[in-house]
């Protein structure tokens, strides 16, 4: 509705406006509209002056009253002014700047005032209300709503509101994604009971919530829409009525399924590492014992004729020791400490050779090959790879109960093709070897424990549970990975990934000379008295003079005193006071030309390989017989004594 006032009416009621302005929260003003020139404020109440900090004179004498209006709101004010001048009242909002610089929001309700002839607007009367607090509240509400939207609708955690009866009344997209729903609407239409795993029912959840009122870092086993497991950590509060009845549940949960798997994998890796260390230590001690048995057997054999009835008994002892050596090799293989002699190898040739040999004793198993012809070489220990293949083939044969098909397949892959979810493969090129059988397969429990040492499904007396454990250790020690694909009653596939290599490894030929002098002095250092005794007897039978040391420190001191006489040092790796590695370095400092043969119940890899890389002359693994020791001594000393006759090469028993 259009309302007009005359000038004389304004004059008569000026006092009334002043009185009213003091009784209300609104501020009143009068803006003169001359026929020509700018408009100016002719009157404004004291409250407005107090609000803005400007005096009446400062406002009324201002050449341009628009200067106190926020620049961004000037278009709004000018548009509203034109509306009023066209004979219409107007309500509009804008910002003004107080004298202190503070920004204020106001709502202006203005209307035109006409001359007595009613032809022209001569002034504008307005009532202004300070709405700064309201605007601040609106902005705070808007920010709060935005935070809520980001937190509830866009946050990575799954937010939800539900009723105790299992109705989901609100959730965010993250909640829907966690459980495999395509949309929030689909999640809302699904009863909450369906996402709880059998081992963790919703009734138990509600019981715990009613008791504790809230849940902090509450772990639950949930269920994905496809049936797979979902592990969650949840922070939830219960809303209760005046009678203490649970009426609503509000919570945030996070999917920690991958984290849970990683923690389980880490725990398993630590367990296997611990057991591996134990297995390696046991194997080392067994090798020392076997060394004593084998050494004394060799010494007795040396003095017996082959026709002696006791000779064959000693052969049986040697055979038993050999079986013990194979057992310790499996333990060392699992501990990633097995015999390790790197060469550039053709994996296809090893696969065919080993499988053909295995197939001769398993004529009822049909072996097929799909071997890629363009795969590069690998850097590996041939004996260990053959052991891996034989263990996998034997395992497959047992799973097929002696009747089935085996497929051995090689191919070129990269790290992105390794189906690893619980570790990060080292980037690079790999050779994949897949061994697939048509056997009975494995259930989930068996698959998870298949590489554990001493775990077997073959029953008492039919398996030691070390075959696949050693496979795992050997592949890991070669920088590779092994994964299992299996399903109960549908066979298994063991996928092995070994780093590809373009290097060519130079193969050195050991000298076969027999020209080692029997007069050479050999220092043997070992902390095991029985092993030391056997070693001294070996050297004595081979015609050498033996000096002994029971630790690394003694070895260095004995060598220092007899450096000119000692032709070779046989050094045990693990000794008290000073280990073999440090003793080797000290001896080389005394005489850079010193010859050293490392000896250990452990393997050539690790510390032994490091010493060999520093120039050590050879390695012999316990247990060893006299013939093997003779060959190693002959190999190292032949060059030194090329012109002399006799020596270790004469031992041919």
Image: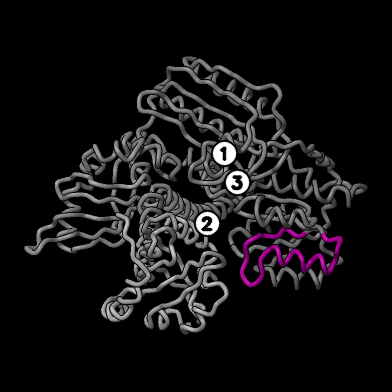
Indicate the secondary structure of the residue bearing disc 2: helix
Which of the two labelled residues, at mark 2 and mark 3, occupies the earlier sequence position?
2
Please give the label number shown on residue 477. 3
Q: Is residue 309 visible?
A: no
Magenta-drawn stretch contains 589 = yes
Q: Quadrant of the N terminus?
A: bottom left
Mark 3 vs 1, N-terminal side: 1
For the residues carrying marks 2 and 3, which lies nearer the camera in this image? 3
- Looking at the rendering, the stretch of residues picked out in magenta corresponds to 569-594
Which callout, 1 or 2, points to the residue nearer the camera?
2
How far apart are labels 1 and 2 at the CA level? Answer: 28 Å
Mark 1, residue position: 315
Q: Is residue 148 above or below residue 509?
A: below
Between disc 1 and disc 2, whose residue precedes?
2
Q: Position of residue 432 (x, y in %)?
A: 60, 31
From what the image shows, is residue 312 above or below residue 396?
A: below
């Amino acid at each position: 509705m259009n309302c007009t006032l005359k000038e004389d009416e304004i004059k008569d009621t000026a006092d009334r406006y002043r009185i009213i302005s003091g009784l209300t929260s609104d501020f009143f003003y009068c803006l003169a509209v001359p026929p020509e020139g700018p408009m100016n404020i002719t009157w404004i109440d004291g409250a407005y002056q107090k609000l803005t900090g400007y005096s009446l004179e400062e406002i009324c004498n201002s050449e341009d009253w628009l200067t106190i209006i926020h620049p961004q709101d000037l278009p709004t004010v000018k548009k509203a002014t034109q509306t009023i001048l066209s004979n219409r009242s107007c309500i509009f909002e804008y910002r003004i700047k107080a004298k202190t610089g503070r920004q204020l929001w106001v709502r202006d309700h203005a209307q035109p005032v006409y001359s007595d002839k009613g032809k022209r607007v001569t002034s504008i009367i307005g009532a202004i209300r300070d709405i700064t607090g309201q605007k601040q509240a609106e902005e705070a509400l808007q920010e709060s709503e935005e935070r809520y939207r980001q937190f509830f609708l866009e946050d990575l955690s799954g937010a939800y509101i539900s009723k105790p009866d299992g109705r989901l009344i609100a959730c965010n997209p993250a909640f829907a994604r966690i459980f495999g729903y395509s949309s929030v609407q689909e999640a809302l239409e699904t009863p909450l009971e369906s996402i709880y795993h059998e081992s963790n029912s919703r009734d138990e959840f509600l019981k715990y919530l009613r008791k504790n009122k809230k849940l902090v870092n509450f772990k639950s086993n949930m269920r994905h829409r496809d049936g797979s497991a979902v592990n969650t950590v949840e922070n939830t509060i219960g809303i209760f009525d005046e009678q203490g009845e649970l009426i609503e549940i509000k919570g945030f949960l996070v999917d920690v399924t991958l984290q849970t798997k990683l923690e389980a994998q880490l725990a398993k890796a630590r367990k296997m590492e611990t057991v591996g260390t134990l297995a390696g230590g046991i194997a080392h001690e067994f090798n020392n014992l076997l060394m004593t048995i084998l050494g004394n057997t060799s010494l007795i054999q040396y003095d017996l004729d082959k026709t002696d009835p006791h000779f064959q008994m000693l052969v049986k002892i040697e055979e038993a020791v050999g079986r013990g050596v194979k057992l310790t090799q499996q333990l060392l293989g699992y501990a990633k400490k097995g015999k390790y002699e790197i060469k550039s190898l053709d994996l296809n040739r090893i696969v065919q050779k080993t499988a053909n040999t295995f197939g001769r004793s398993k004529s009822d198993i049909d072996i097929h090959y799909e071997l890629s012809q363009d795969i590069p070489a690998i850097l590996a220990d041939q004996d260990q790879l053959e052991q891996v293949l034989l263990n996998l083939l034997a395992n497959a044969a047992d799973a097929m109960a002696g009747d089935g098909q085996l497929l051995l397949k090689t191919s070129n892959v990269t790290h992105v093709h390794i189906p690893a979810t619980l570790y990060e493969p080292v980037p690079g090129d790999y050779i994949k070897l897949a061994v697939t059988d048509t056997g009975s397969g494995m259930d989930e429990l068996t698959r998870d424990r298949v590489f554990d040492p001493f775990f077997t499904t073959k029953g008492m007396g039919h398996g030691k549970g070390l075959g696949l454990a050693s496979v795992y250790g050997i592949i890991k020690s070669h920088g590779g990975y092994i994964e299992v694909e299996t399903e109960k009653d549908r066979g298994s596939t063991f996928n092995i990934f070994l780093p590809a290599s373009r290097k060519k490894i130079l193969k050195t030929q050991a000298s076969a000379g027999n020209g080692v002098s029997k007069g050479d002095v050999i220092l043997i250092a070992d902390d095991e008295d029985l092993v030391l005794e056997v070693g001294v007897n070996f050297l004595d039978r081979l015609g050498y003079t033996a000096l002994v040391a029971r630790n690394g420190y003694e070895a260095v001191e004995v060598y220092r005193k007899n450096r000119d006489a000692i032709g070779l040092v046989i050094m045990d790796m693990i000794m008290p006071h000073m280990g073999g590695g440090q003793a080797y370095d000290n001896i080389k400092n005394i005489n850079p030309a010193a010859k050293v043969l490392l000896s250990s119940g452990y393997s050539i890899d690790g510390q032994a390989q490091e010493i060999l890389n520093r120039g050590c002359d050879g390695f012999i693994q316990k247990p060893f017989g006299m013939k093997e020791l003779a060959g190693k001594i002959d190999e190292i000393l032949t060059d030194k004594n090329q012109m002399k006759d006799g020596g270790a090469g004469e031992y041919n028993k």
